[in-house]
Image (cartoon, rainbow, N blue to C red):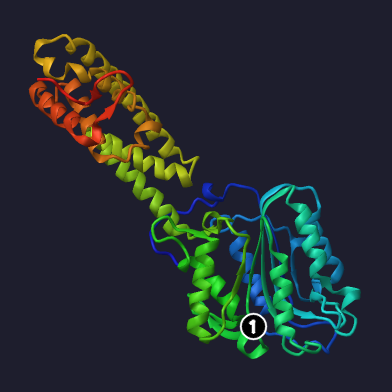
Amino acid sequence: MPEEEHPVVLEGKRPDVLEEKRRAVIIGINEYEDKGIQPLKGAENDAKEIYERLKDPNIGGFEIPKSHFLLGEEATYKATRKAISDLFWKTNPSDLALFYFSGHGFVDSYEDGYIAPYDMSKDEPFVCGINMEQIKQVISRSHKYNKCVIMILDCCFSGIATKGDFKKKFDERIKNLSGEGTIVLSSSEADNVSREISFTHQNGQEHNHGAFTACLIEGLDGQASDDESGIITLDKLHKHVEKRIAEMEGKQKPNLYVAEGFGISSIRMAVAPQKYYANIQMKIEEAERYFLTGIPLDLMDAANRISEVMKISTKNEKALDLKKKIRETLIEYKSDVTNWLIENEAEEDCRPIRSVFPELQILTNNLDFDKIIAISDTRKKAFLGNLCRVSKKLLDKNIFIDLCKKYYSSPSTQRPTAGGPTVGHLNN
């Protein structure tokens, strides 16, 4: 199981970052009813361990009922088609629908591509084989209900190719499964020997796996996670598998087929739970420290930390509570600054900066949680912080006036206004 990098207590529920509807079918077959189909050693291990990680609420958070997890003789033609029907044909909406298969795949003498269920006949694949063109059709129609479809195929070819360039033809059939809203990640294995390896897990257990799926498991166990957030995107998972396969085999390259412009970097496959929760905990603790200083700039930094947490954990109670406190403090600052501007605009000592008081009032409008986190200009944030400080009498007015002159005389803050002078230019 995944490595524990931080002493964080897991919540035992699906992370907020994976809260969308996620459904999967997982299939693995070692030995076939037709003894003419060469048996495999690691396909069922592949499926078991992918299932464990994707179903785990702390890691993948996928819904995978028993009828959608099929091993060996359970994975008959009828049961496999029923699972595919449940996932893609039924009008059961989901944000992410995933189909994983580890077993045999092949092309018949008519150049039709198939994946092989347990009871498929090598000589009559049309009878009980799962035709790839049919899968493509049902997936294409399912996009009315499934926002994104991912197919992961770890198919071995040895011993069942009919004739001709079998490997190339099968790869073409896999590529044709992809399209708008459908992503296919497949092993690129030419034979049984190169595909299956004896793989040692992080807990020291060793058993057979497909090389491709072994690398997938490594990635899902945290090695493909973002260093900071702990989130495992499809893009990072693919890159990890590609890198590790190259290290293992030196010649094999997994295939990723995706429509142009489809953002695989935004597809969240899973999380490394220890890293994910440690990141959230760290950011909340930082935000709490910043908030307690009472310094305006620290308050802005606290808002940024909480904003980062809310992007990946929208229901975190500590983050929501701190967000509420930050909002209330910003409202207080805004009131103080507004009052200060009203009280000081007519004061003689503010004459040198009187022309920019309208700009100061506009700047004050940024004292809002959603607006403050959108400010990327550090000079603007610093100046806004000083505006808050002077309104609280934490900064001498004359010092603020000098800072105001410098800020609004800077070329970066000057911009023309319709029918008037350049805003930011000060007449002393």
Q: Quadrant of the C terminus?
A: top left
Asked if residue 220 shows in the view, the reply is no
Closest to the observer, 250 or 49? 250
Q: Amino acid at mark 1?
A: Glu
- The answer to which quarter of the image holds residue 7 is bottom left
Dot 1, crowdedness within 10 Å: few (<14), some or many (≥20)? many
Closest to the observer, 168 or 209? 168
The percent coordinates of residue 256 (x first, y second) are 60, 69
The percent coordinates of residue 12 (x first, y second) are 54, 52
Residue at 81% of width from left, 77% of height from top?
Answer: 118
Residue at 52% of width from left, 59% of height from top?
Answer: 233
Answer left or right for 406 relative to 414. left
The percent coordinates of residue 19 (x first, y second) are 58, 47
**Label 1 secondary element:** loop
Answer left or right for 50 relative to 382. right
In the picture of the structure, the residue carrying the numbered disc 1 is 189
